[in-house]
Image (cartoon, rainbow, N blue to C red):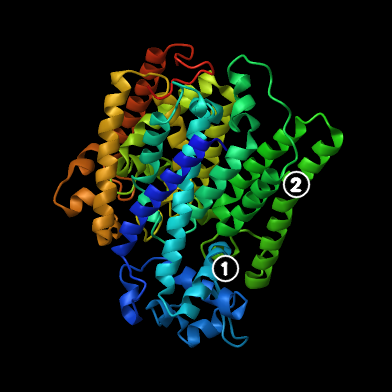
Amino acid sequence: MAPRLRLAAVGVFAVSLAIFSLARMRLVSFGAEGPGQARFLTGDEPSYLLLAHSVAFDRDFNLFNNRTEEHGRFFGVPRCEGHGARKDWERREIYSIHTPGLPILIAPVYALAVRLGVSPRAAVLLFMNLLAALLAVNTWLLCVDLVGGRASLDRPGCVPLVPPLLAMAAVVLTPPVIFYANLIYPELPAALLVLYAFRKALPTWSGGAGEAESRGLPPSPPPRFTGSLIISSLCVAFLPWLSFRFLLPALLLAAMHARRAWTDENPRRRAAALVVAAVPLAVSCALLLGYQQMAFGTWSFAGGYLHQGFGRTAFWARGGLNGLLGLALDQAVGMLAWSPVYLLAVPSVALLAREQPRRGWGLAALVLSLYLPESLYMHWWGGYAPPPRYIVAPAPLLGAALCYALSRSPGRSFTIPFAFLLSVGILFGALGCAYPLTLYRHVHLLACFGVEISSRALPSFLHPVRSTWPLAFAWLFFIAALTAYYLSVWGGGANRRGCPDGGDGGR
């Protein structure tokens, strides 16, 4: 890693961690004891902590003794039930509806905190802060690779720092990432694993020679079977354990890894890389299905939910399009209501797909693989959790597309709306961190302060009314027109300037 790149990455990590830590101090302190630890602790978080306690100290996923012995007292919720889906009192077994991936991930931190006598919730939130800071770094690295390549960082006049920093800020300082950096939910770890795996899945995103394909330079060397591919494949394999909703992106990322491996001309390396790309996910899925069979008696990735009585057909959002459009447009829990800068991500993805098809269509496919299962899920609004919960994982990918658009010297017609919408999102993020209870009311933050702007401008799919569909179609038409306008303004080819490798240095 180039010295300037390393220094900038450390700076991004430190600043992000400081911001997330300041928000954490509003929620809990390390010295908190008893019921005081339960301040702003709600939704699924206590269940994940109870399951982490079972993993850390019982070495199993059975919550029977944890529930009867009130182990929830360690984090201020003595009667935490762990969202038990199967309760067999005769066999002394209770299994949670939630998959155990997140509890497995946080169990070492939880155990260390209990042994040190500090708040396990505070320790786990610090761990989530670290993951969120790593997400910020990976978002920035992806953006740097996209606008100029890491090699350009050490060339005079070719420092593509500004667009990546702005795009990174659009991701980590606005909802929902700024909220979930201090919440115990699987979405943020999933976002980090997806982003890291995606960066490694395409060799042209490794910087240097990997940029040649899109710049008319000599072709990049074939991908090699390296340790990074092993780590990346393990990240993909862990995704289904975080939630059954991440199975589709895991399969897509494994296919991307396999495609990368297939380009290697050496048969042995190609075969080894294909094995590394496919086997970890296959083994992981088999183990997860075995767990579901043992705990709930069904060979399904969503065994806990099915056992609790949701039913197979109930996994689809009510009305089909409700979740698909609501997750993006709903006035209370939609993406645009909380972080309106993502409105510009649609034309940005279209631009990237037009000018760099391999990157653009790969990014778009991964975003859809994350968005569709979330939006079609029966609780598409995220349940009792801050909105928009299910945009956490695709947010860094959308931020990368925004970065590419910013690097294309788009002019004031793009930069001024970007600056304004980014400022609004940062304001909503700051207010949400300052007043966390307002995030659980299934109304927009502005409504809690007596302002009804979003309820008049955006449709409501959480509570449909007569104006819902006319407003929704009006927004869809506006987004399509906005995309067509920006594509025409940007023209048919890249207009970056100033650097030998095509980067504009963020100037």
Q: Earlier in the sequence, mark 1 or mark 2?
A: 2
Q: Report the number of numbered marks.
A: 2
- The single residue placed furthest to the right in the displayed view is 268
Q: Amino acid at mark 2?
A: Val
Q: Amino acid at mark 1?
A: His
> What is the number of the mark on residue 307?
1
Q: Residue at x 49, y 82 (%)?
A: 67
| Viewer can see residue 177 | no
Query: What is the quadrant of the N terminus in the image?
Result: top right
Spatial CA distance of label 1 from label 2 is: 34 Å
Which element is circle 2 on? Answer: helix
Q: Is residue 276 above or below residue 202?
A: below
Residue occupied by mark 2? 276
Q: State if disc 2 and disc 1 touch (CB < 8 Å).
A: no
| Viewer can see residue 224 | yes
Q: Residue at x 38, y 59 (%)?
A: 182
Where residue 409 appears, as percent x and y from the top left, is 38, 18
Q: Residue at x 33, y 39 (%)?
A: 336
Between residues 276 and 210, which one lies in front from this camera angle? 210
Q: Residue at x 70, y 62 (%)?
A: 287
Q: Is residue 431 above or below residue 266?
A: below
Query: What is the quadrant of the C terminus in the image?
Result: top left
